[in-house]
Image: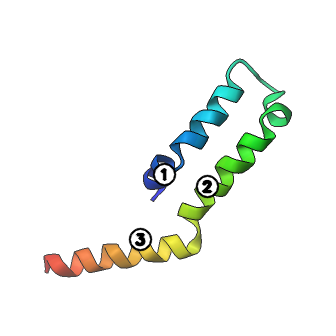
Amino acid sequence: MKAQALKECDPLVAKFAECAKGRLFSVVWACRAQSKETNACLHRYTNDEAFEKYKKQYEEQALQKL
């Protein structure tokens, strides 16, 4: 689930990483917009609804193996 979220949000993660490059403490203020965009994207793929969907898919695959 996490890997899928990172794959789907890769452009935003890369944008945040580029902003954060070379910064230490100032990353919190300087890259706030990129951080919020990245977190919003990741949340779309890692919320409870998405977890239930992945869980159902896993259960269906397990049943098919039986």
Q: Residue at x 78, y 43 (%)?
A: 33
Determine which residue is flagged by label 2: 41
Report the quarter where the N terminus lies. bottom left
Instruction: Give x and y (percent) for residue 51.
Output: 49, 71
In the figure, is residue 2 to the left or right of 26?
left
In the figure, is residue 38 to the left or right of 33?
left
**Earlier sequence position, callout 1 versus callout 3:** 1
Q: In whole angstroms, how far apart are the C-alphas of marks 2 and 1?
A: 8 Å
Instruction: For mark 2, give the secondary structure.
Output: helix
Amino acid type at mark 2: Cys
**Earlier sequence position, callout 2 versus callout 1:** 1
Q: Are marks 2 and 1 in contact (CB under 8 Å)?
A: yes
Residue 59 higher or lower than 31, as above or below: below
Q: In whole angstroms, how far apart are the C-alphas of marks 1 and 3?
A: 15 Å
Q: Residue at x 67, y 56 (%)?
A: 40
Amino acid type at mark 3: Tyr
Determine which residue is flagged by label 3: 54
Q: Are marks 2 and 3 in contact (CB under 8 Å)?
A: no
Q: In whole angstroms, how far apart are the C-alphas of marks 2 and 3?
A: 17 Å
Q: Residue at x 75, y 21 (%)?
A: 23
Determine which residue is flagged by label 1: 8
Q: Residue at x 65, y 47 (%)?
A: 38
- The local crowd at label 2, few if under 14, some if 14 to 19, many if 20 or more residues have their Cα within 10 Å, is some
**Earlier sequence position, callout 2 versus callout 3:** 2
